[in-house]
Image (tube, rainbow, N blue to C red):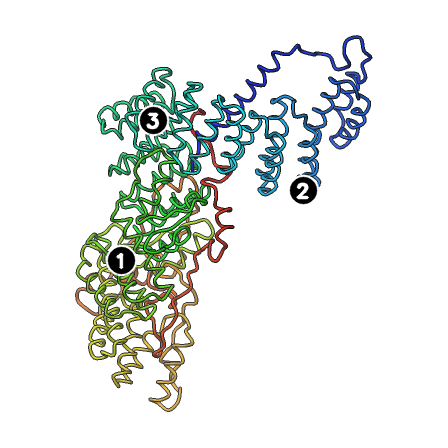
Amino acid sequence: MFGAGLRAALIFILLFSAASEAQQKRAAKAPENRVGAKDGARQLVTDEEFAAVAALPPQERIERLQALARQASGDEVAMRKVAELLVRARLEFGLNQIEAGDQQGALEQFRRAIAEFPESDSDKLFIETIAQIPPQLFARKLHREAFEMARLIETKFNDAPQKLLVIAAFYLRVEDAASAVRCAERAIELAPRMSAAYQALGAARRLELKLDDAVEAYRRALELEGGRSAKLSLADLLRATGRTEEALKLYRELVADNGQDVAARAGLVLALFDSGQREEAERELTAALEENPRNFPLLVGAAYWYAASGDATRAFELARRAVEIEPRYTWAQIALARALIAQRRPLEAERALRFARQYGDFPTLDYELAAALASAGFYAEAAEELARSFKIEDGQIATHLAGKIAARAETFTDLLLPEVRAGLFQSRMAETRENAQRLKGLLALRAAMQAEAKDEELRSAIEEFTAGDDEMSAFRALYAADQLLARGRAYELAIDLAQKAAARVESAVNSPVANVAAVASELRDLRAQTIAVGATPQLPEVPTLIISHIMRGRIEDIIGWSLFNQGRTEEAIIHLRRATGVLPEKSVWWRTALWHLGAALEAAGEAQEALSNYIASYRGGPPNPARRAIIEALYRRLNGSLDGLEERIGGSSLSSFELKSPSSTGAQPAKVEAKSPEAAVEPASGAPSAPPEVKRESEADRSASQTQNSANAVGQNDERRSAERRVGGEATSPPVPRSEDRRADEGSEAKRQRRGKFAKEDEPQPGEPR
């Protein structure tokens, strides 16, 4: 998550510092160019012998060098040369053993190389050999072994500040902040005036999200050295913590020293925005991008700032340019997604964020994906994504920031702001308080349902989730009502929610995402299947009239079914008849309403009509043994046998959900688009053609007959996804989600260790090195 500049820059600084100090030490010594004994003494190991050894395979080289070590006993220069070659040979042999699958043999070679390395030898040799062991292991996914070797090195060289900083650089690279702090503090203890040690400490404190402590560490580094790196890091953190004027002063000094400093120019522009000097910031932004159109830090930072400020068009323009330069940088994709959500293009935002998930894994990314899904009306999926990283504890939201740092807050914006500050150096989150509060309500609703919470807790969560009168409020109300019916809870509240939705249908159907929000539950299986294989489905267009029919029919069905479960059968029948009259014929919602109507009619003593509704509901749907048994029992009771039932049911059943293309009269699988960096920013193309006409009963429906096939296309889902919650008087369990929940039932400590990185180890390092 921290990306880019800081890790690459810090490693460069630490290695340069260590190498330069070691070089100064060596320069003070008289060089010894000859391999051999002191002047006048017999040379114990010749140059020719060393050359011959160097040409051997690593295992033979080790054996020969051990023999030369005995031969060169007493010759200090030769012994040092032997030790250097032996360390290099063991490193090479160990890497060969890893490739051959002998991990234990490799680790033994690495342990010996660390033990045999002369404590007083050069920092250059240390950087080229011993310091390479942990990152080589880590890159091969041997994380536990990498940390073991790093700890051995740290212990052996605990009195060598330059070498400790090199190991601190490894810890920073893999975002092990605690170990980096330990090395940096020990280096400061040994060398209190070493600027690089304070820079390492500042970087580690930033990883811990302790930004005020990081600021103080960088202040001290700047006092000791006054270099560009410490000044830039300090300016960035001052901007992140809202101390804009002080940050501006430092950025101006950096730009005055070097007008081509990419990171400093970016920081200056963003600090001007933060300080309210938008006109000057716009001028500087334009000038900076004219001089360097690929100023990546500026593109990402400015895109996010515009998204947070409500300028979606400008945010999209800059974010798109950023992801074209480096699509793997998670914050660039987050900025793009925020712009797309503001432009009412949440499915494109979802693609961008799912692509980003390949390169980062931290709570803010989970939240952003949930926000995109909720913006499209996929509330069940959004709740699952939130549950990956968050939970409700005593009314607050709890998580582990950066995958490691336990934190809780009243709102998502307060909770996640430290990640935004540390990752982007921005002092505010691109999210509204209202939307963050709704998502908290969604998470609370999910938790309350799973915990079988009291009705008061359910009502509180639902009120928070459904608050507002925006165009999506009707969809939220219907989702919440469905959740109540799924558990057989709070029927009166479900009726209230349905009535609330009814008052906002007109604004809902005109929403840019009504096409998917109205049928979200029926798309869930298809989406889960395609997402699991790294793709996204292209969905058919559903005309506004059909969306209106679906919503109004669902509202009547929710009210009717709730009334029926309250024992108010006659009232229920009225609403259920309305539902079956308005819902698109043969859609899953229509079949569900017919079944509900059949149950109500049977309870009212209208057995014959109930049977007709049961059969009409069952026909054309997938096989359902429970419903078939109910039909058979009633048919046998009315007719004395099952003779003729098969003819009445008739027709073939769908065995699986196929999303039909509206341009076809038959069932065609939905088009699937593979995800790629380009797909993360390109909108779906290819609007479906008009569907063929289907006969309808009412005059209004006949005038819109060409839209009927669209309703069938999205309605032929598995009955397990229907709104039906009760079969023959028995409440049924809600369907088990099929989408991935990779963190279910895992130990929290193991989860934190696995998710402890803001970004994966192969995350790119865009931008200019500091």
The answer to whether residue 200 is above or below residue 704 is: above
Would you say 733 lies left or right of 496 here? Answer: right
Label 1, secondary structure: give it: helix
Position of residue 726 measured from the top left corner of the image (x, y, whole percent)? 34, 74
Quarter of the picture containing the N terminus is top left
**What label does residue 278 carry, if any?**
none
Residue to which mark 2 is pinned: 103
Residue to which mark 1 is pinned: 476
The answer to whether residue 285 is above or below residue 176 is: above
Label 2, secondary structure: give it: helix
Residue at point 41%, 20% (across, down): 223
Would you say 746 lies left or right of 242 here? Answer: right
The answer to whether residue 411 is above or below residue 420 is: below
Residue at point 72%, 21% (across, down): 80
Separation of marks 1 and 2 at Cα, in angstroms: 54 Å
Separation of marks 1 and 3 at Cα, in angstroms: 40 Å
Query: What is the three-letter code of the residue carrying label 2?
Result: Gln
Q: Nearer the viewer, mark 1 or mark 3?
A: 3
Query: What is the three-letter code of the residue carrying label 1?
Result: Arg
Position of residue 322 measured from the top left corner of the image (x, y, whole percent)? 37, 33
Q: Nearer the viewer, residue 385 or 226?
A: 226
Q: Mark 3 Cα within 10 Å, few/some/many (few <14, many 20+)?
A: many
Sequence-wise, the earlier of marks 1 and 2 is: 2
The reply to whether the C-beta atoms of the residues labelled 1 and 3 are less than 8 Å apart is no
Would you say 605 lies left or right of 80 here? Answer: left
Position of residue 607 measured from the top left corner of the image (x, y, whole percent)? 29, 85
Query: What is the three-letter code of the residue carrying label 3?
Result: Gly
The reply to whether the C-beta atoms of the residues labelled 1 and 2 are less than 8 Å apart is no
Sequence-wise, the earlier of marks 3 and 2 is: 2
Quarter of the picture containing the C terminus is top left
Residue to which mark 3 is pinned: 267
Separation of marks 3 and 2 at Cα, in angstroms: 45 Å
